[in-house]
Image: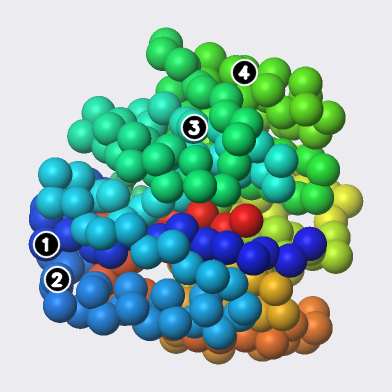
Amino acid sequence: SRFQNVIVKAPARSYVNGLTSSDLGKPDYEKVAEQHRAYVEALKSCGVEATELPADEQYPDSVFVEDPAVLTPEFVVIANPGAESRNGEKEAIEEALKKFYDKFYYIEAPGYLDGGDVLQADDRFYIGLSERTNEEGARQLKEILEKEGYMADILPLKEFFHLKTGIAYLGNNNMVVAGEFIDHPAFADYNRIVINKEDEYSANCIRVNDHVIIPAGYPETKRKIEEAGYQTIELDMSEVQKQDGGLSCLSLRF
Ligand code: CIR
Protein backbone atom coordinates (compact mmCIF):
# COMPACT_ATOMS: atom_id res chain seq x y z
CA SER A 1 0.00 0.00 0.00
CA ARG A 2 1.32 3.40 -0.94
CA PHE A 3 1.33 6.47 1.27
CA GLN A 4 -0.09 9.67 -0.16
CA ASN A 5 0.23 11.95 2.83
CA VAL A 6 2.41 12.71 5.78
CA ILE A 7 1.97 15.04 8.73
CA VAL A 8 5.11 16.57 10.19
CA LYS A 9 5.70 19.33 12.70
CA ALA A 10 8.66 21.70 12.78
CA PRO A 11 10.91 21.47 15.85
CA ALA A 12 10.46 24.26 18.38
CA ARG A 13 13.38 26.12 19.97
CA SER A 14 12.30 24.43 23.19
CA TYR A 15 13.20 21.08 21.55
CA VAL A 16 16.60 21.25 23.20
CA ASN A 17 14.88 21.00 26.62
CA GLY A 18 12.71 18.00 25.76
CA LEU A 19 12.66 14.58 27.38
CA THR A 20 15.59 12.28 26.92
CA SER A 21 17.30 9.32 28.51
CA SER A 22 20.34 9.48 26.23
CA ASP A 23 23.75 10.77 27.23
CA LEU A 24 24.57 12.11 23.78
CA GLY A 25 24.50 15.75 24.84
CA LYS A 26 22.20 18.68 24.20
CA PRO A 27 20.88 18.99 20.66
CA ASP A 28 21.59 22.07 18.56
CA TYR A 29 18.41 23.83 17.48
CA GLU A 30 19.68 25.10 14.10
CA LYS A 31 21.01 21.67 13.29
CA VAL A 32 17.83 19.81 14.21
CA ALA A 33 15.83 22.32 12.17
CA GLU A 34 18.09 21.57 9.19
CA GLN A 35 17.84 17.80 9.74
CA HIS A 36 14.07 18.12 9.94
CA ARG A 37 13.93 20.06 6.66
CA ALA A 38 16.00 17.34 4.99
CA TYR A 39 13.61 14.73 6.41
CA VAL A 40 10.58 16.51 4.94
CA GLU A 41 12.33 16.83 1.58
CA ALA A 42 13.17 13.12 1.60
CA LEU A 43 9.55 12.22 2.31
CA LYS A 44 8.36 14.44 -0.53
CA SER A 45 10.86 12.81 -2.86
CA CYS A 46 9.10 9.51 -2.06
CA GLY A 47 5.91 10.90 -3.55
CA VAL A 48 3.88 12.07 -0.56
CA GLU A 49 2.19 15.40 0.14
CA ALA A 50 3.41 16.90 3.40
CA THR A 51 1.18 18.77 5.82
CA GLU A 52 3.71 20.83 7.77
CA LEU A 53 2.46 21.98 11.15
CA PRO A 54 4.09 25.01 12.78
CA ALA A 55 6.43 24.58 15.73
CA ASP A 56 4.82 24.77 19.15
CA GLU A 57 7.13 26.13 21.87
CA GLN A 58 4.81 24.89 24.60
CA TYR A 59 5.64 21.28 23.71
CA PRO A 60 9.38 20.58 23.39
CA ASP A 61 8.80 17.04 22.09
CA SER A 62 5.98 17.87 19.69
CA VAL A 63 8.19 17.31 16.63
CA PHE A 64 7.64 13.60 17.37
CA VAL A 65 4.16 13.52 15.81
CA GLU A 66 4.00 9.74 15.68
CA ASP A 67 3.23 9.44 19.38
CA PRO A 68 -0.15 11.21 19.69
CA ALA A 69 -1.96 9.14 17.04
CA VAL A 70 -2.23 5.71 15.42
CA LEU A 71 -3.45 5.67 11.82
CA THR A 72 -4.89 3.05 9.54
CA PRO A 73 -6.18 3.76 6.04
CA GLU A 74 -9.73 3.77 7.44
CA PHE A 75 -9.62 5.52 10.81
CA VAL A 76 -7.60 7.39 13.42
CA VAL A 77 -6.97 6.44 17.02
CA ILE A 78 -5.98 9.49 19.05
CA ALA A 79 -3.54 8.12 21.60
CA ASN A 80 -3.10 9.21 25.18
CA PRO A 81 0.65 9.89 25.46
CA GLY A 82 2.09 8.54 28.66
CA ALA A 83 4.46 11.44 29.37
CA GLU A 84 2.55 14.23 31.07
CA SER A 85 4.53 16.99 29.35
CA ARG A 86 3.49 15.55 25.98
CA ASN A 87 -0.14 14.63 26.51
CA GLY A 88 -1.55 17.91 25.17
CA GLU A 89 0.22 17.44 21.83
CA LYS A 90 -2.70 15.30 20.70
CA GLU A 91 -4.99 18.32 20.23
CA ALA A 92 -3.08 19.86 17.30
CA ILE A 93 -2.63 16.41 15.74
CA GLU A 94 -6.34 15.61 15.92
CA GLU A 95 -7.12 18.97 14.34
CA ALA A 96 -4.72 18.31 11.46
CA LEU A 97 -6.11 14.80 10.89
CA LYS A 98 -9.70 16.06 10.65
CA LYS A 99 -8.91 17.30 7.18
CA PHE A 100 -8.24 13.72 6.06
CA TYR A 101 -10.39 11.43 8.23
CA ASP A 102 -14.00 11.21 9.52
CA LYS A 103 -13.65 8.29 11.86
CA PHE A 104 -11.88 8.86 15.19
CA TYR A 105 -11.38 6.65 18.23
CA TYR A 106 -9.73 7.71 21.49
CA ILE A 107 -7.53 6.00 24.06
CA GLU A 108 -8.79 7.15 27.44
CA ALA A 109 -7.30 7.34 30.94
CA PRO A 110 -6.47 5.26 32.88
CA GLY A 111 -5.23 3.92 29.55
CA TYR A 112 -2.02 5.47 28.21
CA LEU A 113 -0.44 4.82 24.85
CA ASP A 114 2.26 6.33 22.61
CA GLY A 115 2.08 5.75 18.86
CA GLY A 116 5.77 4.80 18.98
CA ASP A 117 4.68 1.59 20.69
CA VAL A 118 2.49 0.54 17.77
CA LEU A 119 3.70 -1.26 14.66
CA GLN A 120 1.50 -2.22 11.73
CA ALA A 121 2.46 -5.17 9.53
CA ASP A 122 -0.26 -5.62 6.90
CA ASP A 123 -3.45 -6.58 8.76
CA ARG A 124 -1.75 -7.18 12.10
CA PHE A 125 -0.68 -4.70 14.76
CA TYR A 126 1.90 -5.14 17.50
CA ILE A 127 1.47 -3.04 20.64
CA GLY A 128 4.39 -2.70 23.06
CA LEU A 129 3.99 -2.21 26.79
CA SER A 130 6.52 0.40 27.85
CA GLU A 131 7.06 3.28 30.25
CA ARG A 132 4.59 5.20 28.04
CA THR A 133 2.02 2.55 27.15
CA ASN A 134 0.23 0.67 29.91
CA GLU A 135 -1.86 -2.48 29.76
CA GLU A 136 -5.12 -0.59 29.79
CA GLY A 137 -4.06 1.63 26.88
CA ALA A 138 -2.90 -1.38 24.91
CA ARG A 139 -6.12 -3.24 25.68
CA GLN A 140 -8.24 -0.33 24.46
CA LEU A 141 -6.28 -0.12 21.22
CA LYS A 142 -6.48 -3.88 20.65
CA GLU A 143 -10.24 -3.77 21.12
CA ILE A 144 -10.64 -0.94 18.60
CA LEU A 145 -8.40 -2.66 16.04
CA GLU A 146 -10.12 -6.03 16.39
CA LYS A 147 -13.54 -4.44 16.07
CA GLU A 148 -12.32 -2.92 12.79
CA GLY A 149 -11.11 -6.26 11.46
CA TYR A 150 -7.40 -6.10 12.28
CA MET A 151 -5.43 -8.49 14.46
CA ALA A 152 -3.48 -7.16 17.42
CA ASP A 153 -0.84 -8.64 19.72
CA ILE A 154 0.37 -7.01 22.92
CA LEU A 155 4.03 -7.49 23.87
CA PRO A 156 5.83 -6.30 26.99
CA LEU A 157 9.13 -4.56 26.20
CA LYS A 158 12.23 -5.49 28.12
CA GLU A 159 14.82 -2.94 27.05
CA PHE A 160 13.64 -0.72 24.24
CA PHE A 161 12.14 2.69 24.97
CA HIS A 162 9.34 2.28 22.45
CA LEU A 163 8.38 -0.78 20.40
CA LYS A 164 9.49 0.89 17.17
CA THR A 165 12.87 1.80 18.68
CA GLY A 166 13.90 -1.74 17.74
CA ILE A 167 11.72 -2.85 14.86
CA ALA A 168 10.39 -1.78 11.47
CA TYR A 169 8.14 -3.46 8.93
CA LEU A 170 9.12 -2.95 5.30
CA GLY A 171 6.27 -4.84 3.63
CA ASN A 172 6.64 -8.11 1.67
CA ASN A 173 6.94 -9.99 4.99
CA ASN A 174 10.29 -8.25 5.65
CA MET A 175 10.83 -7.24 9.28
CA VAL A 176 13.86 -5.30 10.49
CA VAL A 177 14.66 -6.49 14.02
CA ALA A 178 17.17 -5.56 16.70
CA GLY A 179 17.91 -6.51 20.31
CA GLU A 180 15.10 -8.23 22.15
CA PHE A 181 13.10 -8.70 18.93
CA ILE A 182 15.71 -10.75 17.06
CA ASP A 183 14.59 -14.03 18.62
CA HIS A 184 11.14 -12.95 19.75
CA PRO A 185 8.54 -15.64 18.90
CA ALA A 186 6.06 -13.00 17.72
CA PHE A 187 8.28 -12.24 14.72
CA ALA A 188 9.53 -15.75 13.93
CA ASP A 189 7.51 -16.07 10.72
CA TYR A 190 8.84 -12.93 9.04
CA ASN A 191 11.91 -12.66 6.84
CA ARG A 192 14.04 -11.05 9.49
CA ILE A 193 16.63 -8.43 8.63
CA VAL A 194 18.79 -8.58 11.74
CA ILE A 195 20.51 -5.42 12.94
CA ASN A 196 23.81 -5.67 14.83
CA LYS A 197 24.00 -4.49 18.41
CA GLU A 198 26.24 -1.52 17.53
CA ASP A 199 23.83 -0.49 14.76
CA GLU A 200 20.70 -0.73 16.89
CA TYR A 201 19.66 2.87 16.28
CA SER A 202 19.20 2.08 12.58
CA ALA A 203 16.45 -0.47 13.28
CA ASN A 204 14.10 2.50 13.37
CA CYS A 205 13.76 3.05 9.64
CA ILE A 206 10.73 3.72 7.45
CA ARG A 207 9.52 2.35 4.17
CA VAL A 208 7.89 5.11 2.17
CA ASN A 209 6.61 3.84 -1.16
CA ASP A 210 9.62 2.86 -3.27
CA HIS A 211 12.28 3.76 -0.70
CA VAL A 212 13.44 2.88 2.77
CA ILE A 213 14.72 5.88 4.70
CA ILE A 214 17.50 4.95 7.12
CA PRO A 215 19.77 6.96 9.43
CA ALA A 216 23.15 7.87 7.94
CA GLY A 217 26.24 6.12 9.23
CA TYR A 218 25.12 2.48 9.25
CA PRO A 219 26.66 0.85 6.16
CA GLU A 220 25.83 -2.69 7.32
CA THR A 221 22.15 -1.83 7.72
CA LYS A 222 22.14 -0.08 4.36
CA ARG A 223 23.66 -3.14 2.72
CA LYS A 224 21.17 -5.53 4.32
CA ILE A 225 18.16 -3.45 3.33
CA GLU A 226 19.40 -3.04 -0.22
CA GLU A 227 20.05 -6.78 -0.40
CA ALA A 228 16.41 -7.32 0.54
CA GLY A 229 15.51 -5.37 -2.60
CA TYR A 230 14.94 -1.79 -1.47
CA GLN A 231 16.44 1.52 -2.50
CA THR A 232 17.63 3.49 0.51
CA ILE A 233 17.83 7.17 1.41
CA GLU A 234 20.20 8.07 4.25
CA LEU A 235 19.55 11.00 6.57
CA ASP A 236 21.67 12.53 9.29
CA MET A 237 19.71 12.04 12.51
CA SER A 238 22.26 13.10 15.15
CA GLU A 239 20.16 15.81 16.81
CA VAL A 240 17.02 13.65 16.77
CA GLN A 241 18.80 10.71 18.37
CA LYS A 242 19.92 12.98 21.23
CA GLN A 243 16.26 13.28 22.29
CA ASP A 244 15.53 9.54 21.90
CA GLY A 245 13.80 10.06 18.57
CA GLY A 246 14.10 8.20 15.29
CA LEU A 247 12.87 8.36 11.72
CA SER A 248 9.44 6.88 12.39
CA CYS A 249 8.73 9.29 15.26
CA LEU A 250 8.95 12.37 13.03
CA SER A 251 5.93 11.72 10.83
CA LEU A 252 2.47 10.27 10.55
CA ARG A 253 2.23 8.48 7.21
CA PHE A 254 -1.02 7.51 5.51
C1 CIR B 1 10.10 11.51 24.27
O1 CIR B 1 10.79 11.15 25.24
O2 CIR B 1 8.89 11.38 24.26
C2 CIR B 1 10.79 12.13 23.09
N1 CIR B 1 11.96 12.83 23.53
C3 CIR B 1 11.15 11.09 22.06
C4 CIR B 1 9.96 10.43 21.45
C5 CIR B 1 10.35 9.49 20.36
N2 CIR B 1 9.21 8.96 19.73
C6 CIR B 1 9.11 7.73 19.29
O3 CIR B 1 10.00 6.90 19.51
N3 CIR B 1 7.98 7.40 18.68
Determine whether label 2 and label 1 are within 8 Å by CB: yes
Which residue is at a point 36% across and 53% down the rendered structure image? Answer: 64
The percent position of residue 209, horizontal first and vertical second, equals 70, 73
Could you tell me how far apart the alpha carbons at marks 3 and 4 are, in whole angstroms? 14 Å
The percent position of residue 61, horizontal first and vertical second, equals 26, 50
The amino acid type of the residue labelled 3 equals: Ile
Residue wearing tag 4: 139
Q: Which mark is residue 29?
A: 2
Mark closer to the observer (1, 4): 1
Could you tell me how far apart the alpha carbons at marks 2 and 3 are, in whole angstroms? 28 Å
Which residue is at a point 42% across and 47% down the rendered structure image? Answer: 96
Residue wearing tag 1: 13
Label 4 or label 2, whichever comes before in sequence order: 2
Image: 1 above or below 86 = below
- Are there few (<14), some (14-19), or many (20+) residues within 10 Å of tag 2? some
User: Could you say whether the residue bearing mark 4 is in a helix, strand or loop?
Assistant: helix
The amino acid type of the residue labelled 2 equals: Tyr
Q: Which mark is residue 3?
A: none
Label 2 or label 1, whichever comes before in sequence order: 1
The percent position of residue 84, horizontal first and vertical second, equals 25, 28
User: Could you say whether the residue bearing mark 1 is in a helix, strand or loop?
Assistant: helix
